[in-house]
Structure formats: C-alpha cells, structure tokens
Image (cartoon, rainbow, N blue to C red):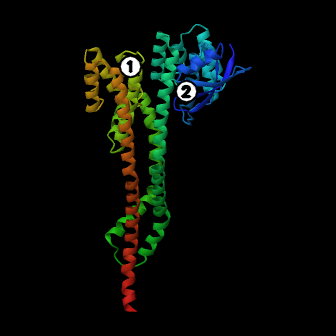
Amino acid sequence: MPAYAYRATSQEGKIQKGLAQAEHETALALALKKSGLELIEAKVKTKAYISLRPTTRSGGTLEPQIKLCHQLATMLKAHVPLTEALRLAAEGLSPPLFQKAIQEIVKDIEGGTPVTPAFAHHASLFDPVFLALLETGEATGSLAEAFSRLHEHLQWQEEMMRRLRHALRYPLFLLALAMGVVGFMMLFVLPQLIDFLSSFDKELPLITRILIAGAQLFGLLWWLLPTLLALMIILIPWQRRRSVRFASYTDALALRLPGFGAVLRALALARMAACLSLLVKGGVDIRRSIERSGKTTANRFLQDMAGQAAQRVIQGYPLSQALDRLFPPFVLQMLKVGEKSGTLGEVLDSTAKALDQEARETVRSFLGILEPALTLCVGAIMAWIVLAVLGPVYGLLTPLSQGM
C-alpha cells in the first residue's frame, strides 16, 4: 500500500500537511473527508514514513500521546493496519522511552495480545481513561473513532495545564522575590542596623524591639525553613505511597486550603466531567465511567468519593443522585434534565464545558487576588522595617538638631 504526502484544508480553512497510507488517491480523499478535511494535493512517497509533527503544537508532557493519537486516528481511517500504523508512528516519536514502549506494544499485538492489554502494560504512559476508551473502541471495532476522541481529550487536558502554568508563572516569581528580599534584609541589612541602634543608650520603641527579636531569631533558625520544606517534599510523598488513608487525608486537606483549594477542586471536577462525558459517549457503562473518570482528578479524596458514587449507581440511584457529593447543584440539575429527556450524553458534554469555564474563572479570580495580596504583604513587611528603623533614628536625632 503506497504512502501519500498530502495537503488538505479543514472546515475552518486551515491548511494541514501529513502522511498517510491508502490504496489509491481516491481512498485517501475519502478517508480525509471523514476526518473533516478536504484533499488539495497528494504525492506518492517512496519511503513509508509518517511524520508526527502535530497540526496543533503542544510542548507539555502529553505531547507524545497527542501526536500518537492524532496519527493513529488518521492512519486507521485510511485503513492502515493497526500494527503497521503503530510501527510507522513510533519512528517519529520522542522521547526514546516512549518510542520503545510503542515498539513493545506492536510486538505484543503481533504475538496475539489484545490491543488494550498491550497498551495497559505501559500504564505509566496511558492513564485509565485512555485504556477504558481504547477498550470500548476495540470491543465495538471503532478504534479510529476511539483514537480521535482521545486526541481531542488529550489536547483539552494539555491546554488546561498549559494555561495554569502560564497563569501561575508571575505569582510564583513574585512570591520567590518577596521571600528573597525579606531573607536578604533579615540576614544582611538588619543586623548592621541593630548594632547601630543598640549603640545608643536609650529604650527603643516596641515595634523596633519586635523587629530586632524577629531578626535575631531568623538569623539563628533561617536554616530550619528549607530543612522542613525538604523533609516535607521527601516524607509526604513517601507516606502517601505507603498509606491510602494518609493520601486521602492530605488531598482532602488540600481542597480546604483558602483560595488554592477552590482552584484544585474546580480543575479536578472539570477534568472528571470531561472524562465522564468522553467515556459515556464512547459506550462505557456508567459505573466504570465514574470510577475511571474519578482517577483523572489526581486527588485521592475525590477518587474515593467517585468510587462511592459508582457503588450508589449499582444500588439503583440515578446518576444525578449518585454524584450529589461531588458536583455542584447546577450540574446535578442538568443531569436530572438529561436523565428525564434521554439525552444524558449531550447533557454530560454541556456539563463538562460549563465546568471547564467555571474552572477557568476560578483560576482567574484566584490569581487576581493572589498577585495584589503578595504585593501588599511585601509592602507591609518593608513598611514595618522602615518604621521600626527610622522611628528610633528620628527620635535620637531630633534632640541633637534642637540643641544645635
């Protein structure tokens, strides 16, 4: 089967380039049309190599999965055998570890292992939602559609994380700057000012005495904060791996943090709703959809609640009641409407979009408060230092100026 280098246009008018195999140019045009693309030009390539340069550039950790799903969906729709599509896709994947995993998957499938178990052997690269949708596509014979859905889902997930990283960049820089300024003042500037103020035989104001005590304490125990931070970074993940109960407790505690907890919850529920919609529309039963989408929250406490919701579905509760401990009231109301009208798949899709928008607004509001709050804290600390130092200096110099 020849490989074609093609140029096509999307419904939005964007030009896309790629490589795909097809029996002839007409078959290629039909396969691209099913993907929403209109063929412009196709040339036969002597070397069957599929480039993995994605039409949407993504620089995060999900980039290899996004590229893989995009290429597999395109090639499977062009009737390329799965093992051949995987082999061709692996040639352009990076990092090498991911490329090696795909090569091992090809060997497993050719050795008789079903598709989903072959991918499941590399669970560190493919999460439960990926495997659940892949299993459904394998059972229904629609792997191309499964990979297409996974491509859309992974792109959404990558976009959310990229926006969050970009939004947090400036507040984290401001926080690091504030800590650096305060640490420099406490360790290098204030000790010299304290020696100067102590040289005068006069009682200092309370605000100055508090500053001196704080600076002296900081000078003695400044090493304690980074040590405790390092221990927390090491011990907490270690204990979380050892104890499920501890992991659930710390995740529940994180959700109660002022401001930041609301952001974590909003992002987690947006991910869960998007995955739940994806799995239900992909044909996965409700119980398994809840359990597997709950794992995408990256929060053990919410995962446990999702597990409880799945058990309530088994007991006969409708979805809107089973999820009443997880989602806000407006989501439950939408689910009730979907259950009554028989349009649960469409309602779940709308719910996912609504929670996605709410998560973005929550992040935007939190960052809108965080930046001025950090600026205010730094300003308050600097004002305290200035008043505590200049106050007694002014009090000592005033009698001297009056005597002159």
- Percent across and percent down for residue 44 are 71, 20
Observer-nearest residue: 307 or 399?
307
- Image side of residue 12 versus residue 250, left or right: right
Q: Residue extending furthest bottom?
A: 404
Q: Report the front residue among 149 and 310.
A: 149
Q: Amino acid at mark 2?
A: Gln
Amino acid type of the residue tagged 1 in the rendering: Val
Q: Position of residue 282 (x, y in %)?
A: 42, 18
Image quadrant for the C terminus? bottom left
Instruction: Name the mark nearer the viewer: 1 or 2.
Output: 1
Residue 42 shown left or right of residue 128 in the figure:
right
Residue at the far right in the pictured view:
46
Q: Which mark is residue 65?
A: 2
SS assignment at label 2: helix
Q: Residues within 10 Å of mark 1 (few under 14, many from 20)?
A: many
- Which of the image's four quarters has the N terminus? top right
In this view of the protein, can residue 201 be seen by the observer? no
